[in-house]
Amino acid sequence: MHYNSFNGVIRDIQSIKIQGATAVARATLEAYVRFGSNLKIKKSQNWKHEMKVAMAYLLQHSRPTEPLTRNGLLFVWKRINQQPSVFILKKSAQEFIKLLAQTQSRISLLGRAIIKSGDRIFTHCHSSTTEQLLIETHRKKKFHVYTSETRPLFQGRITAKALRTKGIPVTMIVDSAGPFLISPASGRDLMMNSVVIGADAIMPDGSVLNKIGSFGLTLSASVNHVPVYIVASLLKCVGQIPVKIEKRPAKEVWAGAPAGLEILNFAFDKVPANQITYLVTEFGLIEPRQVRQYAKKYYPWILQ
Ligand code: RUB
C-alpha cells in the first residue's frame, strides 16, 4: 500500500547516498513523520496501528546495523503509543533530532581533550560526529589527519573533502596501508598519535561496530600502544534486539566479476572493548566497561 512513500528514502539509505548512522536515523524519522502526517485516518487507534506497521516496515527495509535508527523510532513510538496524534509524532521526532544535534555538540566540546597540537590522527570512513569534533577542535589546535579511502564506496573521500574545506591538512592512503601507517614501522614522522573513528553500534560490553576495516586499524593501534577513541553518542547503544552485521551487494566490490566467484562484502566489523582507550560521548570520555552503567542511567528506555 502507501509504504511506497518510503521508497525514496529507503533507496537513498541502501545506496549510501544517505550514509552514517546519524544521517540515516534523521532521514528515517523525517520519513516516518511525513508518512504519519499524510495518513488519512480519523480514528486514532487505527492511525496508531498503521504507525506501528510502518515502523516495522522501515526497520525491515533499512540497514540492519543501525541501532540509532531503531532507538529513534522507539523513542517516537513510545510517545505516540500513549498519545496517538500527528502533533505528538512531530513533537517527539523533533525532540529526538534535536537530541542528536545536542549530543554531537557536546561530543565536539568534551572530545577536544583527546587531541594535542601537532598530532597525527588516523580516521576511517565518514562519521559526521568525528568530522564535527575534528573541525571544531582545529579552531584551537593544529593537527594532521590521515584517512583511508574506505573501499568499496569511498566514504573516506567525504571526510577528506569536508576537512580540506575547513583547511585541515589531510593525507589519504589506501585501506590496506592503515595498520602499517599506525605502527612504528612507517617511521617516526608518520606513526600515528591516535586512531579516532565513529561507531554505528555500541554493544553493552563496550565493544563497537563500525565500518569494515576498523578492526584491523584498532588491532594495529592496540599492539603498538596507540590510543583508540570511538566518537559516538550513547544513543547508539544496542538494547534487547541484537544487531546483525550488514552484508552488501557483491557488485560494489567487482561489477564485472567472473561467473561463480563468491564475493563477501561486509559493511562493518567489530572493535573489541579491550582495543578501545575511551569512548568519546555526550557524557565525556568513558571506558568501555562503563557503557552499560551510563546507558542504564541516561537512556534506560533503550535497554528495556
Ligand atoms: C558509516 C560509518 C560511520 C558511522 C558513524 O558507514 O561507519 O563511522 O555510521 O557515523 P556507512 P555518524 O557509510 O556504511 O553508513 O558519526 O555520522 O553517526
Image (cartoon, rainbow, N blue to C red):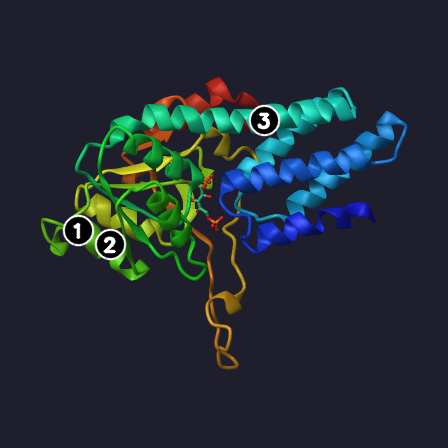
x and y percentages locating residue 96 in the rendered image: 58, 26
x and y percentages locating residue 84 in the rendered image: 78, 24
Is ligand 1 less than 8 Å from the beta carbon at label 3? no
Frontmost of labels 2 and 3 is: 3
Residue contact between numbered discs 1 and 3, judged by CB atoms under 8 Å: no
x and y percentages locating residue 10 in the rendered image: 65, 50
Measured along the vertical axis of the image, is residue 85 above or below residue 161? above
Q: Which badge, 1 or 3, is on the more N-terminal residue? A: 3
Is ligand 1 less than 8 Å from the beta carbon at label 1? no
Q: Quadrant of the C terminus?
A: top right
Identify which residue is drawn at 17% across, 37% down: 118
Q: Which badge, 2 or 3, is on the more N-terminal residue? A: 3
Q: Is residue 242 visible?
A: no
Is ligand 1 less than 8 Å from the beta carbon at label 2? no
Tag shown at residue 183: 1
78 left or right of 203? right
Identify which residue is drawn at 42% across, 57% down: 154
Measured along the vertical axis of the image, is residue 25 above or below residue 93? below
Q: Amino acid at mark 1?
A: Ser
Tell me where residue 113 sits by quadrant. top left
Identify which residue is drawn at 40% across, 60% down: 151
Which of 42 and 269 lies nearest the eye of the viewer? 42
Residue contact between numbered discs 1 and 2, judged by CB atoms under 8 Å: yes
72 left or right of 53? left
Q: Which residue is mark 3?
A: 96
Label 3: state its secondary structure. helix
x and y percentages locating residue 147 in the rendered image: 31, 50
Q: Amino acid at mark 2?
A: Pro
